Amino acid sequence: MLTHRPLCPEGKAGRRAGPENPGLCPPRSRPFVLAATIAASAMAFIDGSVVNIALPTIQRELGAGFGALQWVVNAYVLLLGALILVGGGLGDRFGRRRVFVAGILLFAAASLACALAPDVAWLIAARALQGAGAALLVPQSLAIIAAAFPKDERGRAIGTWAGASAITTALGPPLGGLLIDWLDWRAAFWINLPLSLAAVWLALRHVPESRDETAAGPLDWRGGALAVLGCGLLTVGLTRLSEGGGAPALVTLAAGVAALWWFLRTERRAAAPLMPPELFREPAFLGANVMTLFLYGALGAVLFLLPFDLIGRRGLGAAEVGLTLLPLGLIIGTLSRAAGGLVDRAGARLPLALGAALVALGAAGLAAAPGGYWTAVLGPVVVLAAGMALVVSPLTTVVMNAVPDTRSGAASGINNAASRLAGLLAVAVGGALANLVFQRAADLPGQRFGVLPPAGDPLRPAVEAAFATAYGGALWLAAAWAALAAAVALVMLRPRRHPSAGA
């Protein structure tokens, strides 16, 4: 029963809640608000990393092709990335806490369906439902923080959220890997259920309700449908292209581009657009979202492809893959709070540029570094983690501070959509490139990317060489995307001179 009364109810904060500070809470209530948003966000973030580790096992046990594995990832990211704009708008209109709780419950139900999936088609459908639930809860997390914390404390609060979410997310791959090794891949979804219960309890007990009182007009469902259609067609086209789809794949890609063009036209004319065009007139908001596309595209490609190398080529178990990814979350978690505070004091441009450059260096190291596990895998992962630690909190803070507080839901939704859709396209483009290069280099009918013959098999050297070529080429592309993100930070996030400044 939804009968809990929050400790900081709407309109009874330390300062009166209103259009400028809806849901603002006194200091004693804010840690509980952070705890609720961290628990829910960690659940959504853990799911992505643990499922990537489970992909080789799912491929083997369900007999799934590489294209189907791409959809196990992309069905989730597609619905999350496209509907997250709808989620932000729903929270602004109908209450962020209400939509937050609804998203958690939907995510939990979908996780249960994933754990019970009898085949890969069922799993893909349940993953899409998971994405819809995440699209409701993820944008509310940052919007709730923006509503509950005053602007001069927001950078540190977002840094705490990012750091704690990263630490909990970091524990997901090792724990999920152990459960996958001990039980099976379905354990990757069972672990979401206790997190869901904790997040719902915290939200109902402690999170104040807030909304944008200035939001008017019906929600832009047409824009949301066009975003899903356009991104879905692009993903289908890229997946088919990687499997030799030929002309039908190109036609599907063209249809996806046309749907996205129609989406942009719709947003310009909508009374209450999901992606308000006026927000992009702010240079910091535009630059931060362009940077998000490149940077999270690079990260998404690395996280999707790395488990195939570790499990398929190097012979590691799922738990060992989880431990390999552990530094990524721990380093981001321990440094994000400090990085968020740095933005409050000194600005975001240089940390963002340096962080993106380190991500490019880490991806290049994974693509090119010869040798064993320590030099060719763990070292580059640590460098990449250090780069993301410098970027995660400052990038989010730039986005949220570039818009009025009343538009925090829309801003959070747009930036989250950018990061999720970047991962979607990275998996589609990176996966297509890797699969095409592998098929041409291996020249063995029926051989699947990521599935290598056992040691001692006469075909092993040729297949492994083809895999290394394909894997390295896709990660060089990821490194280029991260380098472009660094360039965007330097060019588009320059500090603006105040008009009243003297000579």
Image (cartoon, rainbow, N blue to C red):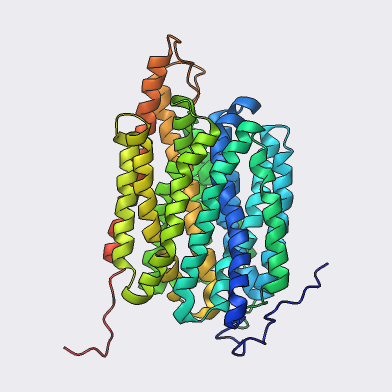
Which residue occupies the foreground of this view, 23 or 222?
23
Residue 314 falls left or right of residue 346: right
Q: Residue at x 40, y 71 (%)?
A: 341
Q: Residue furthest top?
A: 458
* Residue 445, visible in the rendered structure: yes
Query: Who's the residue at 31% across and 41% down the image?
Result: 364
Quadrant the C terminus occupies:
bottom left
**440 vs 142: above or below:** above
Q: Is residue 265 visible?
A: no
Q: Position of residue 332 (x, y in %)?
A: 43, 56
Q: Residue at x 65, y 54 (%)?
A: 132
Horizontal placement of 368 versus 195: left or right? left
In this picture, residue 361 sits left or right of residue 440: left
Quadrant showing the N terminus: bottom right
Taking depth in this image into account, of 341 and 423 the one nearest to the observer is 341
- Which residue occupies the foreground of this view, 190 or 287? 190
Q: Position of residue 219 (x, y in %)?
A: 64, 70
- At horizontal 59% and vertical 43% (from top left) the residue drawn is 175
Rendering quarter of residue 101: bottom right
Instruction: Tell which residue pokes out farthest to the left in this image.
Output: 503
- Locate residue 23, reporting x and y percent: 62, 80
